[in-house]
Image (spheres, grey):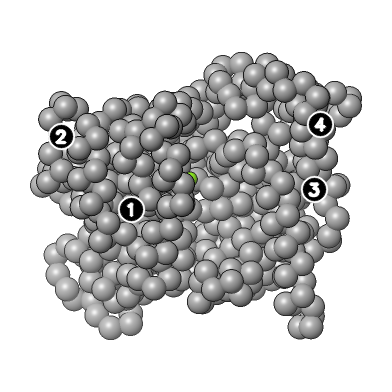
Amino acid sequence: MELDQMDVNEWKYHGEGNKSLVVSHLQRSQVFRFLKYPASDTENLCKTARNAFIHVQKIVDFSKNVMKPLLGENYVHHGVVVQLPLEFVQSVCLKVQQERPESRCDKMMDTFSGYALCLPNLTKLPAFHFSEKQSSLCIEIKPKCGFLPFSRHVSRETKYRVCRFCMHQHLKLANGKWHRMSRYCPLDLFSGSKQRMSFALKNLLQEPQNNLKIFKNGTLIYGCKDEKDSLQDLNTLIHHLKPYFYPANGLISGSHGTRTVLNELIHVITVALLNATDSRRKYIPEGRTYCEASTLHREILRKGISGLPKDCVLSKILQAQTLDNLDIEGLYPLYRRVQQHLEEFPEERTRLQIDGPYDKSFLEKLENVQPEDDGTVEYAVQKVHQYRVAMTAKDCSIMIAFSPCAEDELPDSHLVIPSSKSRFTYSVSILDLDPKPYENIPHQYKLDGKIVNYFLKKTLGKQ
Ligand code: ATP
Ligand code: ZN
Ligand code: MG
Ligand code: MG
């Protein structure tokens, strides 16, 4: 790629989150991920080109040196920082503006620094097992937190029984963020039980919110851009899916056909999520493994504690999430300890690696935290680091890309999902692995209280 000869016509809007906007190349499997700023911040932007570079480089370092060793080499693509001509970046910004969902337009793309993160387009299969003529399908899942807190610092009993996602739904509905309740519960997805996982995936398909997206050949065909602009027609989705699962004919029809196609899709996703080199070794987190808000039948919930194969993608994410083992309620006093120390000794910020560097020693400290609090600032900082890594793992997305494949061209037996009618090659990756800011911890503490209080207020009358 010649960075000084970029052509805006070869790039299109791909998607965005709260922190970044992504454009993809029309042919190559490549995306640029640009930072976003609050629209009111424009005055400062010109001065921050250097800061933008440092920021994007930190994202790369954190993904590469911290999240990759924790989550697995195969799943994480850390990418590289690129410096693009400002003229190109500005034309991209103009081009994508009309595609952006309204609710995201309170922030604007960084067109001042020229820096972006260059990543492979994970909605497509890597070239080595992807022949050009085949079309690919990709499911993106943002699974959120998959365990109930087990820390003794938790002050409200409800938090041991109802998961954060399910509680948060009530507040999100009240705030108008979404108009319909999602029945997805992360504990079902992370259970390892096929029945509970299917239930979770069905609920994601029914009401994707920002937890599920489906791409066909790199283009979004299902999911929410925002609450006003959603692509959520299941019939249209099924129309897109049929050729993948029933390539030969359109024999199946009506509600039976609909269910069959969705079940096949769910089967493929489940196999990909549970795929492991050794499926005998299981991971089950501490604490209760089902959530009282899940609408699945109680008996199934209780029985469905099968655990996850230790090195499958869900297990890797869950293990990183459970680094938050004190809960925000146990962590917040430690954050205050660090904060007080820094107020007294601001120069300590560097030694304690509060803002990085995210290197090997950062990871080592994180992995060797002493079991008991000895009252030191070192202990507190390490717990804060662990918490921040867990936050990243609670916010990441899983990408499952797959493509039909003939029996005689199977690239690797591990990559085949033997669904009843079709064979697929697939790849699984994890994205959105930015470090979460240290400064966000007080906000997280307040938000936690707000979510629990609102949930209790809403549901108390009904119990
Ligand atoms: P969040 O609000 O979830 O924190 P974010 O602003 O950090 O989001 P990302 O999640 O990294 O941004 O990117 C936004 C969207 O762009 C993703 O949900 C995904 O659909 C798409 N995307 C990001 N990186 C890639 C990639 N490498 N390949 C394909 N699509 C990508
Ligand atoms: Zn739940
Ligand atoms: Mg994201
Ligand atoms: Mg993010």
The quarter in which the C terminus is drawn is bottom right
Q: Residue at x 23, y 76 (%)?
A: 252
Dot 1 or dot 3: first in sequence order is: 1
Q: Which residue is mark 3?
A: 329
Viewer-side label of 4, 3: 4
Q: Residue at x 49, y 41 (%)?
A: 313
Amino acid type of disc 2? Met
Residue 4 left/right relative to 413: left
Within the image, what quadrant is residue 317 found in?
top right
Q: Are marks 4 and 2 in contact (CB under 8 Å)?
A: no
Q: Is residue 52 visible?
A: no
Q: CA distance from mark 2 to mark 1?
A: 20 Å
Q: Which residue is mark 1?
A: 15
Vertically, is 191 above or below 64? below
Residue 324 numbered tag: none
Residue 177 left/right relative to 125: right
Q: Residue at x 63, y 64 (%)?
A: 168
Q: Are marks 4 and 3 in contact (CB under 8 Å)?
A: no
Amino acid type of disc 3? Glu
Which SS class for mark 3?
helix
Extreme right residue here?
374
Vertically, is 319 above or below 61? below
Q: Residue at x 67, y 31 (%)?
A: 385
Q: Is mark 1 within 8 Å of ligand 1?
A: yes
Dot 4 or dot 2: first in sequence order is: 2
Q: Are marks 2 and 1 in contact (CB under 8 Å)?
A: no
The quarter in which the N terminus is drawn is top left
Q: CA distance from mark 4 to mark 3?
A: 18 Å
Q: Which residue is mark 2?
A: 6
Q: Which residue is mark 4?
A: 340
